[in-house]
Image (cartoon, rainbow, N blue to C red):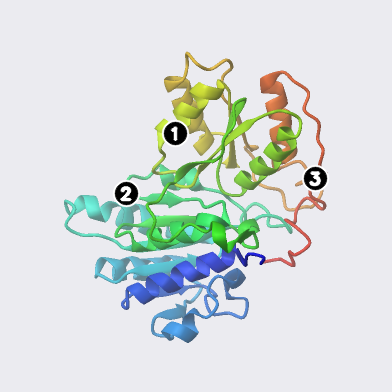
Amino acid sequence: MQDKTTHFSAQINQAQKQAMRQDPNMICMGLGINDPKNIFGTTQGLEDEFGSHRVFDMPTSENAMTGIGIGAAIAGTRVLMTHQRVDFFLLALDQLVNNAAKWHYMFNGQMSVPLTLRLIIGRGWGQGPTHQQSLQSWFAHIPGLKVVTPGLTDNVGQLLYQSIMDNNPTVFLEHRWLHNQEVSESKLVSFQNQIDTTRIIREGTDITLIANSYMLLEAIHASNQMQRQGVSCEIIEIACTSDINWSTIYKSVNKTNYCLITDIGHLSFSVSSEVAARVSEHCFTQLKKPPVRLGLPDIPEPTSFGLTTNFYNGQKEIIDAVSDVLATNIRHTEQAQSPHDVPGSWFKGPF
């Protein structure tokens, strides 16, 4: 009998429902939360089950709605808020950085802000400079914020559920190209399991690949090609950039002696920069070459189809980088996604 399958978006949906069932005072709010598409299907059925007093749309006023959410959380209500683009949320940065992130510390641990912000990262279909930014390194720089960047369907529900049930503020960054990612239900991680946010996805011996969010999928696809050619990659996922288990990374790099870090953000001052610095500091004597990084160029994303052709990294760039590091010729045995600005034939866009 064939296993049932589930999608990334469905697990996000289930995590919200389970949290709302567990905490009857929890509220779920955000732009388009009950619109016909239900934010890529992630909020489907929430209002029907929990009512409009707990699940409700908000006016297009990001700063105001975030302030309301923070105030409700400070008053003791567990809050899940969704913004359909990270970029739109930037209007509320002062609320997040100077209020939510500092509250627990400023009141000597006596007060909490049980707030989770779902911020969705755009890409493709002409998203352009103000609709596709991956800003996890911004948020991870702020003490008091938990920053989660899920990459796989098997544990995204666990990551969201435990983010929601955390009594301090969490920024949950979803890449929209992940929502239709499918996995067998038998491989799902229980929402209540002890969370492992720095985990080895695949063991290997030749090089350590470290990735987050959508780039984790590209790393897995690249590794599949390289494995068929005798190159063994150890893949590590960083799902929480504010709470990295460095010993997992150091142990892997000390074993393979090579390290490639891929990131969904811009290259300079990125999560990959921090990982490369730490690896260099702690694995210097075992490294046979310096850590290598892949990230977006330090320019805004163009809007036009033509100018975005070579803007993003994928499995091709990962394979080329590994070839350079290992000084070997690894062939490309799979064609790149075509067209380059959609994740697959299932995607109908634009939102």
Q: Which residue corresponds to the image point at 30% horizontal and 67% vertical from the top-left?
A: 73
Q: Of discs 2 and 3, which sits in the foreground?
A: 3
Residue assigned mark 3 = 336
Read off the residue under disc 2: 144
The CA distance from mark 2 to mark 3 is 40 Å
Nearest to the observer: residue 127 or residue 174: 174
The local crowd at label 3, few if under 14, some if 14 to 19, many if 20 or more residues have their Cα within 10 Å, is: few
Report x, y in % for residue 147.
Answer: 43, 50
Quickly name the residue at label 1.
248
Q: Is residue 295 above or below residue 84?
A: above
Q: Answer with mark 1 or mark 3, whichever residue precedes in sequence.
A: 1
> Which numbered dot is residue 341?
none
Front position in the image: 245 or 125: 245
In the rendered view, tell whether residue 335 sits above or below residue 324: below
Label 1: few (<14), some (14–19) or many (≥20) C-alpha neighbours in 10 Å = few
Helix or strand or loop: what does disc 2 sit on? loop
